Image (cartoon, rainbow, N blue to C red):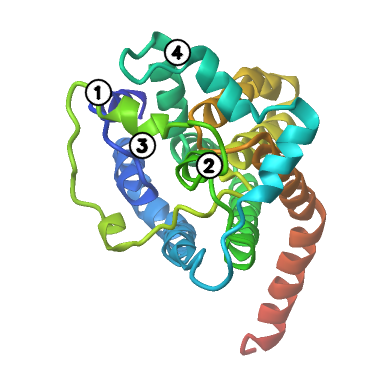
Amino acid sequence: MAASTTLLIGLGIPIPPDRYFVVLLVPALLVRRARSFILDWAPFLLLLLSYEFLRGLAGRVGEVHYLTAIRFDSMIFGTPPPVVLQQWFGHTSSLAPYDYLFAVLYLLHFVMPLSFAYLLWLRSAEQFTRFTGAFLLLSYAALATFILYPAAPPWLASQEGYLPEVHELVGVVLSAFPEHLHLPTVYAMFDPNQVAAVPSLHAAYPLLLMLFACRFFRWRGLLLAPYVLGVWLAVVYMGEHYVFDVVVGALYSGAAFVAAEHALPRVWRSAARLRRHLAPA
């Protein structure tokens, strides 16, 4: 898994869930659990792909919002952090090592949660179900927000004249990778929207991962704290999100974790009792 992920990132290849599913299938074959892997992961993957497909609805219904996040960041920091960080550290003509580091953290958007889910799947079906349930709940809660409240990222707000110059540094860095390949993927049929900034799922997913890591592995879960903070800094610096987006994403993540710990198990137990009741004698 690590070698495959390193190769894809080194080539500058995005790693969407359908492509990473194949990466995860290889070690499942090695441990002779390929059949159970496909049966256990297929519903989760289909729901995740459906979320990504429906995300393209953002911005098609209501007006795109530009000012809420700008006002929040300006109230707290004076000048929105994406502007300040790029003025201090961003140089599109000559990339620094931290630009590549932040791009890698950005590319791990699906890799880290799915790898963590894979580890839980190897350990415990209950842990896997609880984490993936929270992951999907978080994703679909964010989807509802994207549709009802489409919000522009800093780089788009800059293009529309709402902010000083802010570049979309992710694209700039990826274009500088040694080789940029476009391998076949079902994502080519999707139409993801660029006005799905609130909440920031790039901020929410790492926090959810750390919360469950602390839940299942206790203090060792805190070893993920540098990764979480690194992603938060990366998405702000690279012009993808405001601090406001990160804060809202963290709140959504905490809510999904609490729901998975308390509400979802009750739903699953009720569904199990209903299945037993309806089962033929």
Q: Mark 2 points at which residue?
A: 117
Q: Where is residue 278 in the image (x, y as percent from the top left)?
A: 67, 87
At mark 4, the secondary structure is helix
Three-letter amino acid code at the position of disc 1:
Phe
Q: Name the residue under label 3.
A: 31
Give the vertical position of 279 relative to 97 (above or below): below
Q: Which mark is residue 36?
A: none
At mark 2, the secondary structure is helix
Q: Do the residues labelled 1 and 3 touch (CB within 8 Å)?
A: no
- Does residue 273 appear left or right of residue 190 in this picture? right
Q: Closer to the camera: disc 2 or disc 4? A: 4
- Does residue 107 appear left or right of residue 128 in this picture? left
Q: Mark 4 points at which residue?
A: 98
Q: Badge 2 local density, few (<14 within 10 Å), some, or many (20+)?
A: many
- Does residue 196 appear left or right of residue 1 in this picture? right
Position of the C terminus, as image quadrant, is: bottom right
Say which residue appears at 70% left-offset and 74% top-offset: 271
Gap between marks 1 and 3, in whole Å?
Answer: 34 Å
Gap between marks 2 and 1, in whole Å?
Answer: 29 Å
Give the vertical position of 74 relative to 268 (above or below): above
Q: Do the residues labelled 2 and 4 touch (CB within 8 Å)?
A: no
Q: Do the residues labelled 2 and 1 touch (CB within 8 Å)?
A: no
